[in-house]
Every structure is written in C-alpha cells, then in structure tokens.
Image: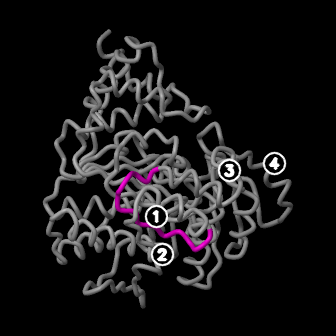
C-alpha cells in the first residue's frame, strides 16, 4: 500500500490548474502561516521578460555557484521533470524532498482553508526549499507577467526585465505598454533594475520605475557589449558563450551588468576567470542547441512570434540551407504568424500536437495556412523525423521540445 501511495503529494500538485484570477492573496496567506520563509532567502534576484529570462537566470546561477557563492535557482516551465524547476548549482531538488515539502504545504492549505493553484504551490515549494538551504543568492524566474505572478511575493534586491514583446496577451494586455506595466511590477523599492527593453515602451514606463528606484541600467544606453565572429567583449572580458544565437547578445550583456552590480554593490569578488569559464560552459538544453552539424539538427524552445523571428535570423546566419521544421505550439502563441515566419527557412513544416491542454490543433492550422509546405505529423512518425539524414529544425513549446528530446536521447542510447 505504501509504495502505491508514494509521492501522492506530487500527484496532487500535477492535478492542479493555474489560476485565471490574478492575486497574491492566497500565496501570501499560506506563506504567513509558514512564518514567511520568503524573508529568509538571502540576496534575491527576480527576472521577468518575454524571452531570454531563463537563459539569464541560468547564466547568473552558473557564475555565482562557480564563484563559490551558493545560489538557488527557481525557473519554469521544465523540459523533463518538475525537479528541474528548483535547483542549487547543478543539483535539482530530489523527488523525496519535493514530495515532503508539498506535504507540509498541503497540510497548511487544509488548516487555513486556502487552495493554491499549480504555479503558486510549486513556487511555495521553491521558496521553502531554498530558504532552508541557506544560500547566499536565490534567483527566481517569473512565470507570467510580473505584478501578480506568484514569485512577486519575494523582495528582490536585483530586478531584471530582459525584453518586452506581445505574449500572454489574454492575461497581460494586447499592447507593449500594457505588458510593460505588468512586468515592471516586479521592481522593488530601491532595488537595482537592469533591462533590455527598447526605448518604447521603456520611455513610457520610466516615471513609474523612478518612483520605485533610481538604480536603473538600460541595455545600449547605460551598458553595452561587442559581438564579432562568435566572440563577446564586455569591458575587459572576452569569451565565446556555449549559448548560441544572436538573441544571446542582449542576455549576455544583462548577465555581465548584473555581475558588475554584484561586485560593486554587494561586496562579492566575482573573478573574471570564473565568469568566462561559466559562460563558455553553461548547460541549458533546448536553447538553439545544435545536436548535429551534418546534417543540421537544431532544437529551440522558441514558442512565440518574437522568439520565432529571432530563431529564423539565427538559422539564416548559420546557413542558407532549407530545413524540415518539426513544430508543436500552444494555441495562444499566434501559431499562424509563427508558421509564416518559419516558411522563410523551410522546405516543409510538419505540425504536431503538444501534450498540453492549450495545444494548437494541427489540422485547423493547416487549413488556415493552406500551403503545400505545411503538413500534418503524428507522434508515431516523430522518431523517423529525428533519425532522418536531413537538415531538421525542431521548435515550439517547451512541453513539445521536452518530449522530443526524451525520444532523441532514447534513440541515441539504443
């Protein structure tokens, strides 16, 4: 009986849905009953943005841990398992620890008659686990937006917004300005604020930001980075990052500016050698990952129009060859706009359902596109596409890419 009920609390978490009513009341109620563990998180860094926030979070975590500054990391979503979302260094939370902390929180929910959403619940797990770990730094990647995101209960000393593009319009608004106003909600009083936002919408929200902090650093205005022939140069650092693609230029600049702020304002010595070694050896799967060069096999979690545009630019810079594109997307990510962008580099685009209730419906999309190059695929043939000796680009939702990489790894181990 015990083995059948093992990790019951994880099963309960997986059953939960995300909230459609933005509020921090429930998560604050639970954290209050747990004696506010979010106040014991050391120096916290909060990161939001439309794209790139995961790469920035992972890069900073790698640098800080390699500098012997114990650092926790909370990210979402995950490629393979829930455990990836909460880590210290390269070690993810164990399934046993995850289940035990969930049990504590679920008992608290029953006691105070509050039921958290999926993301609120996993966020409280992250807060409890990382607060007990006595880390020097803890980095939290925002799930969606900023102002009402569950991670916004954390009092970040450093706030980062990578960039602003149209995504999650049903929750955040349908203009860049509305989305920006939601995302700047993560900025805390007198924190250090670093951003890759473009002049619009930044100039329209600058006065709101100034009410919170004067410590503002804007990419291409207050700091910059040179990039030539795969090499970055930032102040006295020169390196070649393991994270590939033109979109990483902004991310690397934000990471290095954040390192400068940590060195100059928090009293920690981040040695240049550790920074360079970290950036040259980051492991962050699915981010313009080139699995094979001949033929090209490229995997990328580009999942919205802005990210797909960047992905197409990166592929064009790499080669003029056409690709078979294997695509699985969520329906709320403008799939038709994304497919029209991908047609610029494709000989064929094959559409697959995503293992998520928000998946696009491939046959509906195919009919709307009405292009011979866009065809339907099925999971039975996915392994064949992975094995084919043709230039192939796998992209779309992280849920789809996670399933695909599992299949890729299982084929490689055969």
Label 4 close to label 1 by CB (< 8 Å): no
Q: Horizontally, is 390 left or right of 284 in the view?
A: right
Q: Horizontally, is 151 left or right of 38 in the view?
A: right
Q: Horizontally, is 33 left or right of 302 in the view?
A: left
Q: Is residue 137 above or below residue 12?
A: below
Q: Residue furthest top?
A: 1
Task: Kindly report which numbered mark, 1 or 3, lies closer to the viewer in this rendering.
Answer: 3
Q: Is the residue marked by circle 2 packed among few (<14), some (14-19), or many (20+) residues within 10 Å?
A: some
Marks 4/2: CA–CA distance: 32 Å
Marks 1/2: CA–CA distance: 9 Å
Q: Which mark is residue 173?
A: 3
Task: Kindly report which numbered mark, 4 or 3, lies closer to the viewer in this rendering.
Answer: 3
Q: x and y percent of residue 200 in the render?
A: 62, 70
Marks 4/1: CA–CA distance: 28 Å
Judge whether residue 390 can be spotted in this image.
no
Q: Is residue 363 above or below residue 262?
A: above
Give, as a single range, the part of the protein colored magenta: 186-200
Question: Tag 4's secondary structure?
Answer: helix
Q: Which mark is residue 287?
A: 1
Q: x and y percent of residue 199 in the render?
A: 58, 74
Name the residue carrying label 4.
364
Task: Kindly report which numbered mark, 4 or 1, lies closer to the viewer in this rendering.
Answer: 1
Q: Residue at x 39, y 75 (%)?
A: 253
Label 1 close to label 3 by CB (< 8 Å): no
The numbered mark, 4 or 3, whose residue comes first in the sequence reads 3
Q: Is the residue marked by circle 1 packed among few (<14), some (14-19), or many (20+) residues within 10 Å?
A: many
The numbered mark, 1 or 2, whose residue comes first in the sequence reads 2
Marks 1/3: CA–CA distance: 27 Å
């Amino acid at each position: 009986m015990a083995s059948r009920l093992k990790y019951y609390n994880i099963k309960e978490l997986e059953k939960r849905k995300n909230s459609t009513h933005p509020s921090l009341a429930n998560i604050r109620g639970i954290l209050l009953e747990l004696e506010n563990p979010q106040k014991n998180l050391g120096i916290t860094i909060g990161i939001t943005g439309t794209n790139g926030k995961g790469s920035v979070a992972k890069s900073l975590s790698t640098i800080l841990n390699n500098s012997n500054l114990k650092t926790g990391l909370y990210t979402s979503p995950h490629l393979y398992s829930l455990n990836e979302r909460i880590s210290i260094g390269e070690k993810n939370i164990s399934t046993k620890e995850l289940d035990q902390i969930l049990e504590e929180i679920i008992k608290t929910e029953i006691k105070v008659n509050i039921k958290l959403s999926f993301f609120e619940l996993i966020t409280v797990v992250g807060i409890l686990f990382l607060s007990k770990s006595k880390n020097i730094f803890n980095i939290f990647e925002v799930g969606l937006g900023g102002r009402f995101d569950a991670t916004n209960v954390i009092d970040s000393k450093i706030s980062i917004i990578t960039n602003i593009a149209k995504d999650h319009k049903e929750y955040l608004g349908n203009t860049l300005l509305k989305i920006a106003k939601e995302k700047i909600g993560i900025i805390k009083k007198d924190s250090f604020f670093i951003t890759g936002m473009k002049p619009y919408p930044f100039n329209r929200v600058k006065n709101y930001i100034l009410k919170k902090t004067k410590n503002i650093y804007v990419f291409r205005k207050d700091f910059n980075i040179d990039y030539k022939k795969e090499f970055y140069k930032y102040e006295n650092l020169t390196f070649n990052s393991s994270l590939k693609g033109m979109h990483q230029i902004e991310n690397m600049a934000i990471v290095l500016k954040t390192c400068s702020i940590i060195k100059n304002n928090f009293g920690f010595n981040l040695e240049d050698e550790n920074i360079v070694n970290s950036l040259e050896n980051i492991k962050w799967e699915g981010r313009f990952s080139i699995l094979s060069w001949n033929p090209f096999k490229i995997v990328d979690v580009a999942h919205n129009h802005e990210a797909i545009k960047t992905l197409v630019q990166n592929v064009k810079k790499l080669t003029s060859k056409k690709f078979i594109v294997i695509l699985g997307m969520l329906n709320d990510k403008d799939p038709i706009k994304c497919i029209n962008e991908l047609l610029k580099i494709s000989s064929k685009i094959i559409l697959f359902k995503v293992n998520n209730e928000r998946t696009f419906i491939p046959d509906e999309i195919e009919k709307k596109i009405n292009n011979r190059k866009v065809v339907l695929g099925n999971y039975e043939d996915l392994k064949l596409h992975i094995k084919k000796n043709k230039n192939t680009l796998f992209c779309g939702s992280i849920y789809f890419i996670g399933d695909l990489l599992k299949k890729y790894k299982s084929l490689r181990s055969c």
